[in-house]
Image: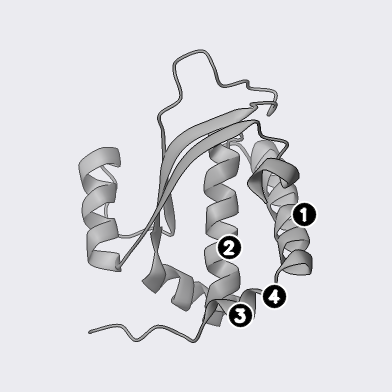
């Protein structure tokens, strides 16, 4: 799906799902931010190969996704944790394509593309099929 929806020629993408304590550790260690977060993206593309016009034809990176945040935000936004996970993957991939969400205008643009891609993926694959809500140890 990545190749078709994002018009990619190639990608090398790792997706690692972690619990909140591990995400907080990664967030502190690499970004010097306190606490957990929903997704952290590491871009390993060679310098200068990423196009700021969102036309990158290949991806090389890692996404760390927090399952605890997905479950909590799914409750808050009245959706499924599966949909939240898919949204986090899309969000991370968009960062790898050069999208940014620091400025409000860029964040709106990124959110529109994120929502468009999530709708397309949901149309192609029923996300509820990913499984039941995972059981997490306290």
For the point 52% across and 82% down, the residue is: 131
Q: Nearer the viewer, residue 115 or 17?
A: 17
For the point 68% across and 29% down, the residue is: 54
Image position, residue 67 (x, y; %):
40, 70
According to the picture, the residue beneath numbered tag 4 turns out to be: 126
What separation in Å lies between label 4 and label 1 (alpha carbons)? 15 Å
According to the picture, the residue beneath numbered tag 3 turns out to be: 129
Q: Is residue 98 left or right of residue 17?
A: right
For the point 60% across and 52% down, the residue is: 90
Chain-order first, disc 2 or disc 1: 2
Crowding around mark 1 (Cα neighbors within 10 Å: few <14, some 14 to 19, many 20+) is few
In the structure shown, which secondary structural element does the residue marked by tag 2 occupy?
A: helix
Q: Is there a contact, CB below 8 Å, between mark 4 and mark 1?
A: no
Image position, residue 25 (x, y; %):
21, 54
Crowding around mark 2 (Cα neighbors within 10 Å: few <14, some 14 to 19, many 20+) is some
Q: Nearer the viewer, residue 102 or 120?
A: 120
User: Which numbered tag is attached to residue 116?
Assistant: 1
In the structure shown, which secondary structural element does the residue marked by tag 3 occupy?
A: helix
Chain-order first, disc 3 or disc 2: 2
Q: Is there a contact, CB below 8 Å, between mark 2 and mark 4?
A: no
Q: Is residue 41 above or below residue 22?
A: above
Chain-order first, disc 4 or disc 1: 1
Crowding around mark 3 (Cα neighbors within 10 Å: few <14, some 14 to 19, many 20+) is few
What separation in Å lies between label 2 and label 4 (alpha carbons)? 11 Å
Q: Is there a contact, CB below 8 Å, between mark 1 and mark 3?
A: no
What separation in Å lies between label 1 and label 3 (alpha carbons)? 20 Å
Q: Is there a contact, CB below 8 Å, between mark 3 and mark 4?
A: yes
According to the picture, the residue beneath numbered tag 2 turns out to be: 86
What separation in Å lies between label 3 and label 2 (alpha carbons)? 12 Å
């Amino acid at each position: 799906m990545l190749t078709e929806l994002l018009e990619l020629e190639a990608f090398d993408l790792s997706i690692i799902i972690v619990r909140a304590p591990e995400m907080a550790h990664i967030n502190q260690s690499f970004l010097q931010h306190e606490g957990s977060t929903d997704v952290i993206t590491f871009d390993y593309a060679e310098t200068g190969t990423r196009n700021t016009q969102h036309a990158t034809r290949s991806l090389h990176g890692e996404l760390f996704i927090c399952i605890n945040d997905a479950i909590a935000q799914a409750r808050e936004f009245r959706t499924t944790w599966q949909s939240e996970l898919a949204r986090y993957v899309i969000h991370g991939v968009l960062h790898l394509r050069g999208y940014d969400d620091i400025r409000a205008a860029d964040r709106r643009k990124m959110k529109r593309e994120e929502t468009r891609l999530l709708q397309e993926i949901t149309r192609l694959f029923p996300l509820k099929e990913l499984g039941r809500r995972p059981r997490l140890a306290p």
